[in-house]
Image: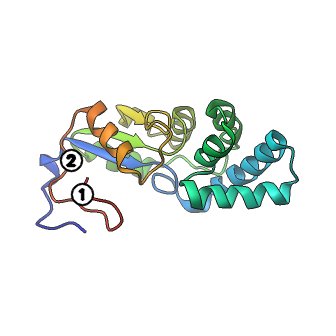
Amino acid sequence: MTTGSPRPLHEIATWVFDLDNTLYSRNCDLFPQIHVKMGEFIARHLGVGLEEARRMQKEYFLRHGTTLRGMMVEHGLEPQAFLDYVHDIDLASVPPDLALGAALAELPGRKIVFTNGSVRHAERVLARLGIDGHFSGIFDIEAASYLPKPDPAGYLELIRRFEFDPPPRRWSRTWRRI
């Protein structure tokens, strides 16, 4: 819940954008590709069938916030191979978005992407959208010490790393004031 009046746009020095299903439409169906790849990775890595891998994938997501985090905690997985594999997807369904580029160009201040994905994934998607030139930084799951959103630690590290002051009186219903 946000209290008070919103700040005028010209007063905002730093904008933070989520990537997946935010900067591009959910209708691009990238997540179905990623979900298939996660199931394949789990099945191969743990030597289980695809049905069991999908069950584990969902369980880890619910228990740990991301499937990756679950694999790290439950199985000691080194994350890079997982991220490389699951983000090796076809981006043909993501159309360039000239209108989004124009809107981003109108926003004053610095623009940063905050994603539970990898930097490489974010760079590929931003380039496909044709908006990569509008962002001065990407804060990914690795930068967040593999603690996925909405863990407050990731937000605090984002703020520290990019040296900005978040808006006052910003609250999350499930987390303490961030």
Helix, strand or loop for disc 2 = loop
First along the sequence among labels 1 and 2: 2
The residue sitting at 28% across, 59% down in the picture is 176
The residue sitting at 47% across, 37% down in the picture is 140
Q: Nearer the viewer, mark 1 or mark 2?
A: 1
Q: Position of residue 153 (x, y in %)?
A: 36, 44
**Quarter of the image with the N terminus in it:** bottom left
The residue sitting at 18% across, 42% down in the picture is 165
Q: Position of residue 40 (x, y in %)?
A: 80, 47
Residue 32 appears anywhere in the view: no
**Pick the front one: 55 or 107:** 55
In the image: residue 171, left or right of residue 99: left
Q: Position of residue 151 (x, y in %)?
A: 41, 51
53 shown above or below 81: below
**Residue on which the image places disc 2:** 166
Q: Residues within 10 Å of mark 2 (few under 14, many from 20)?
A: some
What amino acid type should be assigned to the residue bearing mark 2? Pro
The residue sitting at 66% across, 60% down in the picture is 59
**Residue on which the image places disc 1:** 177
Residue 169: quarter of image: bottom left
Residue 96 appears anywhere in the view: yes
**Pick the front one: 137 or 73:** 73
Structural distance between the alpha carbons of marks 1 and 2: 11 Å
28 shown above or below 87: below
Helix, strand or loop for disc 1 = loop
What amino acid type should be assigned to the residue bearing mark 1? Arg
Residue 77: quarter of image: top right
Residue 131: quarter of image: top left
In the image: residue 97, left or right of residue 81: left
Q: Residues within 10 Å of mark 1 (few under 14, many from 20)?
A: few
Q: Are marks 1 and 2 in contact (CB under 8 Å)?
A: no
